[in-house]
């Protein structure tokens, strides 16, 4: 027969592996066999935790308080205080939790495992109270104590918690690194542990702005907790999901927040329920609800949160309450609420940006647009300072989402003022959310190179839409390793309006499209002056773009004549509608300046528009830089002396295309299958000024830097670009789809062209849709002849464009 002590140990193991029903049976049996008072007290302390986890907080606290009333052993009393700290932490009662945990640690009697558990529990309280340095310190010390005690599971739990605190402190790469180090130990233990790992990892993705990836994970985690009848954890997953949806679907966020609050109140976790009430209030503000009852309710929620030490949550509620007062037309009440907000320098970036936004909205509502724009600049400066610590393009572009609302507010205020100079500044600041950090070239990673080789091999044996578990794992490793690359720490300013007009000269016009509040605007700047034009709602443009990609792809195919005519007619109608909606105000001026150059900086909603095929731009050399500032800063193009031409497999005229194109540059290198391998192309790319790649391409919308070209040994990915020792000045992607970009947060675009430009390429020629092989071969061969003779790439594309316009576009600087 098992002893009471052994049953207690097994009960603790069941708790740690996330199996509360089994723990209950083992601990009850242990108590029935225990005769030693100290052991009985220890078993009751463990039973208290299980009761709380199963939704009975009252029984849990009563068991611990009973131990405190009868126990004479000082160490056991410390353990009871420590467990009460845990229970009150789970209930969200931070002040009570900290009191008990501090009392448990005060006597310094807890050593080894007991000390490790108390440290971990106190770390959770520090975390909830927003004191990240103290939380990280306690978690790290706890992990070390557990390791020394030979308890790898508990050490991994503390390490995971340290990663979570690092996430809240803003160190996302280190957060993921610690969580991923802990996962191999924790995830195999139980479905509960797997769900915890997935949920917390998803929260890091939320902080990084990768909402799509996080949404799927959190939704599945919430369902998993529901199947295990773990109401506290299910509520936490729903709470996170509600936070995820605040910007894009506030109505759904409100429903989920209410559901989480109900779960927590049923189990007595009132402070957690108050946090959910705060998210519901934020959703109400997002839905532009403005009743006086909401303001009163906000005061009550904020007071309860502050009472429990949840200062960051309380401040967020007060900020949303101030926004509600502004919507109600009461700036004085909004100003009073703002004075109640005290944000520490360690406050999460989202809270600091929200404060800047509310302050700017208040200034704008009070007739102080200049002050409002200064507030927005300050907020974006905080964001860019954080971004500049990261070198990853993927991470920088996703983090930009935190500044979306601020940037849109800046554009809105500038448009209301009507000055083209101000509209230009805020057009640039909105486009530069992820591009104001000066890029640096990371050193090549042997681990990443090895993973990319394996990923290529796996991709070669898979269908286009099939992704194996090992492929997902490799993608995750490659992506997160890139997140570890340090940033430059240098943030650049957008160019001034005078710098822009000087760079444009007499023959170039800037067309900058902006989308705010579902309305499109066009900023036009040229030697003849500057103007801002309202183009109307975005809805007609979205309608014209619906089906555009399919028409473009179909029209590039070799179809029967009747079907080809129908597809072509549909495409032309769409292009004409887009031309009217986007370029009608400048059509006459562009026709007067025949052959004049055009710099286009479209908003994210226009990603995928084939600008070079729009009738108004016919005959005009055009380029699409990430921003006008990046175009100006590029200056004069360097000479293009060396070149390489690469053909991939299974492209009918690729071999002919590269051989004919190379004739324009005697002495250039040509690679065709089977020699055109990823390793050979990588070596070659680092030695030339012009790199031409003719191969099948695929844009990965879910993870754009895994877009790639099909070479002889498999896919050459966007992440391969970071492994190159040197970047060509001009890159020609004669491949379907690789001019496409995925849009993040309505403005930020990411794709193969972005990756090349971020790495240092001056110009990338690519197509946003499928290209007919014959058309690509003929146009690019002629274009290379012109470029070799000194004609700028954009001019060469314009001169060689077939009837109906070129499918290829110049990204970056075209001259």
Image (cartoon, rainbow, N blue to C red):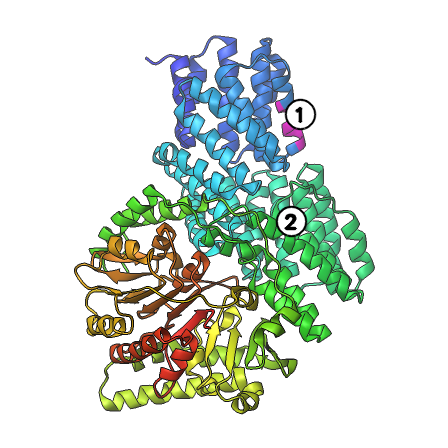
- Could you tell me which residue is drawn at 65 percent across and 80 percent down? 531
Q: Residue furthest left?
A: 674
Q: Which residues are magenta?
A: 95-101
Q: Tell me the distance, in whole angstroms, between the alpha carbons under discs 1 and 2.
A: 27 Å
Relative height, residue 317 to residue 605 (above, below): above
Q: Residues within 10 Å of mark 2 (few under 14, many from 20)?
A: some
Whether residue 628 sits left or right of residue 651 in the image: it is: right
Whether residue 775 sits left or right of residue 377 in the image: it is: left
Q: Is residue 517 visible?
A: no
Which SS class for mark 1? helix
On the image, numbered disc 2 is attached to which residue? 351
> Do the residues bearing badges 1 and 2 touch, measured as CB atoms within 8 Å?
no
Q: Residues within 10 Å of mark 1 (few under 14, many from 20)?
A: some
Position of residue 553 measured from the top left corner of the image (x, y, whole percent): 32, 77
- Could you tell me which residue is drawn at 68 percent across and 50 percent down? 317
On the image, numbered disc 1 is attached to which residue? 99
- The overriding secondary structure of the stretch rendered in magenta is helix
Relative height, residue 644 to residue 92 (above, below): below
Q: Residue furthest right?
A: 332
Position of residue 541 measured from the top left corner of the image (x, y, whole percent): 50, 79
Between 171 and 112, the one lying in front of the other is 171
Between 379 and 636, the one lying in front of the other is 636
Position of residue 610 measured from the top left corner of the image (x, y, whole percent): 42, 77
Q: Quadrant of the N terminus?
A: top left
Between 96 and 771, the one lying in front of the other is 771
Q: In the rendered structure, which disc, 1 or 2, sits on the residue that comes first in sequence?
A: 1
Position of residue 560 measured from the top left corner of the image (x, y, whole percent): 22, 87
């Amino acid at each position: 027969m098992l002893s009471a002590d052994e049953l207690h140990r097994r009960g603790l193991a069941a708790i740690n592996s996330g199996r509360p029903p089994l723990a209950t049976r083992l601990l009850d049996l242990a108590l029935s066999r225990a005769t030693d008072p100290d052991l009985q007290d220890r078993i009751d302390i463990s039973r208290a935790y299980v009761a709380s986890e199963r939704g009975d907080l009252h029984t849990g606290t009563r068991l611990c308080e009973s131990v405190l009333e009868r126990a004479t052993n000082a160490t056991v009393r410390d353990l009871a205080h420590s467990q009460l700290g845990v229970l009150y932490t789970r209930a969200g009662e931070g002040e009570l939790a900290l009191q008990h945990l501090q009392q448990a640690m005060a006597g310094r009697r807890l050593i080894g495992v007991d000390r490790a558990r108390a440290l971990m529990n106190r770390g959770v309280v520090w975390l909830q109270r927003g004191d990240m340095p103290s939380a990280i310190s306690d978690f790290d010390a706890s992990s070390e104590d557990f390791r020394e005690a030979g308890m790898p599971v508990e050490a991994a739990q503390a390490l995971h918690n340290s990663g979570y605190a690092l996430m809240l402190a803003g160190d996302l790469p280190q957060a993921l690194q610690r969580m991923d180090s802990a996962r191999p130990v924790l995830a195999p233990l139980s479905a509960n542990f797997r769900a915890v790992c997935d949920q917390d990892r998803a929260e890091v993705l939320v902080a990084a702005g990768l909402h799509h990836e996080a949404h799927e994970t959190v939704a599945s985690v919430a369902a998993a907790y529901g199947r295990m009848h773990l109401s506290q954890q299910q509520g936490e997953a729903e709470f996170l999901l509600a936070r995820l949806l605040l910007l894009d679907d506030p109505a759904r966020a409100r429903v989920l927040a209410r559901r989480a609050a109900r779960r927590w109140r049923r189990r007595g976790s009132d402070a957690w329920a108050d946090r959910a009430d705060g998210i519901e209030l934020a959703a109400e503000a997002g839905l532009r609800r403005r009743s006086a009852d909401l303001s009163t309710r906000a005061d009550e929620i904020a007071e309860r949160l502050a009472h429990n030490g949840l200062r960051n949550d309380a401040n967020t509620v007060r900020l949303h309450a101030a926004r509600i007062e502004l919507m109600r037309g009461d700036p004085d009440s909004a100003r009073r609420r703002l004075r109640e907000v005290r944000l520490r320098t360690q406050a999460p970036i989202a809270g600091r940006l929200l404060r800047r936004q509310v302050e700017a909205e208040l200034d704008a509502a009070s007739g102080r647009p200049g002050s409002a724009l200064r507030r927005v600049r300050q907020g974006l400066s905080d964001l860019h300072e954080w971004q500049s610590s990261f070198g990853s393009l993927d991470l920088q572009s996703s983090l930009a989402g935190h500044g979306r609302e601020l940037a849109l507010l800046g554009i809105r205020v500038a448009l209301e003022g009507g000055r083209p100079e101000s509209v230009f500044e805020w057009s640039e600041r909105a486009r530069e959310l992820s591009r104001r950090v000066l890029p640096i070239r990371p050193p090549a990673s042997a681990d990443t190179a090895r993973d990319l080789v394996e990923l290529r091999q796996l991709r070669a044996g898979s269908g286009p839409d099939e992704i194996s578990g090992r492929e997902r794992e490799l993608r995750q490793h490659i992506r997160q390793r890139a997140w570890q690359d340090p940033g430059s720490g240098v943030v650049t300013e957008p160019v001034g309006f005078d710098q822009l007009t000087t760079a444009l000269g007499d023959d170039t016009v800037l067309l900058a499209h902006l989308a705010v509040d579902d309305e499109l605007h066009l900023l036009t700047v040229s030697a003849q002056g500057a103007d801002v034009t309202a183009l109307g709602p975005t809805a007609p443009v979205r309608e014209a773009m619906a089906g555009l990609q399919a028409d473009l792809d179909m029209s590039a195919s070799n179809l029967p004549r009747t079907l080809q005519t129908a597809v072509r007619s549909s495409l032309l109608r769409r292009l004409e509608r887009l031309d009217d909606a986007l370029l009608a105000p400048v059509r006459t001026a562009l026709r007067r300046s025949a052959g004049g150059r055009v710099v286009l900086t479209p908003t994210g909603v226009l990603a995928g528009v084939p600008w070079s095929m729009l009738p108004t731009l016919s005959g005009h050399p055009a380029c699409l830089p990430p921003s006008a500032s990046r175009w100006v800063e590029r200056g004069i193009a360097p000479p293009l002396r060396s070149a390489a031409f690469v053909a991939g497999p299974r492209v009918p005229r690729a071999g002919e295309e590269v051989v004919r194109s190379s004739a324009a540059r005697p002495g250039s290198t040509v690679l065709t299958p089977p020699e055109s391998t990823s390793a050979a192309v990588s070596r070659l790319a680092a030695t030339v000024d012009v790199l031409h790649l003719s191969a099948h391409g695929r844009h990965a919308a879910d993870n754009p830097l895994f877009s790639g070209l099909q070479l002889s040994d498999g896919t050459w990915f966007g992440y391969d670009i970071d492994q190159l020792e040197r970047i060509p000045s001009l890159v020609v992607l004669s491949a379907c789809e690789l001019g496409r970009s995925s849009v993040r947060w309505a403005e930020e675009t990411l794709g193969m062209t972005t990756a090349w430009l971020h790495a240092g390429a001056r110009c990338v020629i690519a197509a946003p849709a499928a290209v007919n092989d014959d058309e690509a071969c003929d146009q690019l061969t002629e274009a290379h002849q012109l470029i070799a003779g000194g004609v700028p790439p954009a001019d060469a594309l314009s001169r060689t464009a077939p009837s109906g316009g070129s499918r290829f576009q110049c990204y970056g600087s075209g001259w």
